[in-house]
Amino acid sequence: MMAAILQSEWYKLRKSKALFVLLAVPLLGVLAGLTADMETGIPGAEWLSIISAINNPYGLLFLPLMTGVLAGTICRYEHQEGGWKQLLALPVTRGRVFVAKYMLLLAVMAGMQLLYVAAVYGAGLMQGATEPFPFELLIKIALGGWIAAFPLIALQLWVSILWKSFAAPFVINVIFTLPAVMIVNSEKFGPYYPWTQPFLMMYAGDRQGQLFFIPWDQLLLVVGGSFLIFFLGGLLYFQRKPV
């Protein structure tokens, strides 16, 4: 039954224009990578320069904003012409529908992270990077950004179920995403703001020895804690949502 729900949700998402936006994000990443300064004179810094140039807009803006676009798209059909009633009239539970939508969003975001790795590689080729491609580091960075998006996806799914308007969840996401550009530099608030976590967990810097470049307590408390709050909050709301 879960496979059938996932297949149905994927069909609706594939018919939308969201996937075209998803493909545009790595292209923007390549353009950002082309602005990297490759003449640092520091051994091993070529790829780090490209990664840093891409991560600034990607981790702080592109990745968080895409969670809102995708979540809004995956709920758009149900908000039109009594779609929720038609969906829930089928022999499926609300819990499975919510989990299926969330799992599909995670899968699509994982695909976007793989495209991010490809964007870094493409920018490096265009820049003429001569050092070996840091594949293991890039996978670690991509995986960290994906995990950091777990709570954001859960929140955006919750908000997208709550409001019929596609624009409302996106505007709310923008309102919380834009301040992250300034908050990320704050030692007091940056580590605890959910919208800064994708950037922090994709920023290698001098913390390459840590699992996801952030302390364990920050990973468990901020990422894990906000995920539980947003996911369970959205699930409980959907269980009680009148249709």
Image: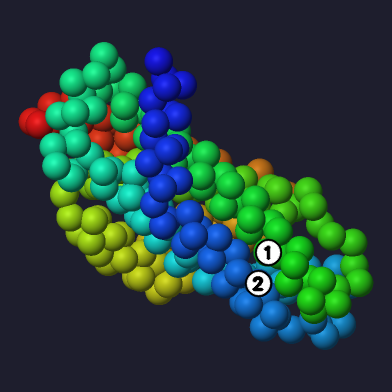
In depth, the one of 151 and 29 nearer the eye is: 29
Residue 30's disc is 2
In depth, the one of 49 and 93 nearer the eye is: 93
User: Disc 1 marks which amino acid?
Assistant: Ala
Q: Quadrant of residue 95?
A: top left
In depth, the one of 141 and 66 nearer the eye is: 66
- Sequence-earlier tag: 1 or 2: 2
Q: Residue at x 87, y 82 (%)?
A: 41
Report x, y in % for residue 84. 18, 33
In depth, the one of 67 and 21 nearer the eye is: 21
Report x, y in % for residue 171. 25, 64
Q: Is residue 109 left or right of residue 140?
A: left
Report x, y in % for residue 164. 16, 49
Q: Residues within 10 Å of mark 2 (few under 14, many from 20)?
A: many
Q: Residue at x 65, y 72 (%)?
A: 30
Q: Is residue 97 above or below residue 111?
A: above
How far apart in space, not on screen, are marks 1 and 2 (Cα)?
5 Å
Residue 175 appears in the picture as rendered: yes
Label 1 with label 2: CB-CB less than 8 Å: yes
Q: Residues within 10 Å of mark 1 (few under 14, many from 20)?
A: many
For label 1, the SS is: helix
Q: Is residue 144 left or right of residue 239?
A: right
The residue indicated by pointer 1 is: 119
Residue 5's disc is none
Report x, y in % for residue 235. 26, 30
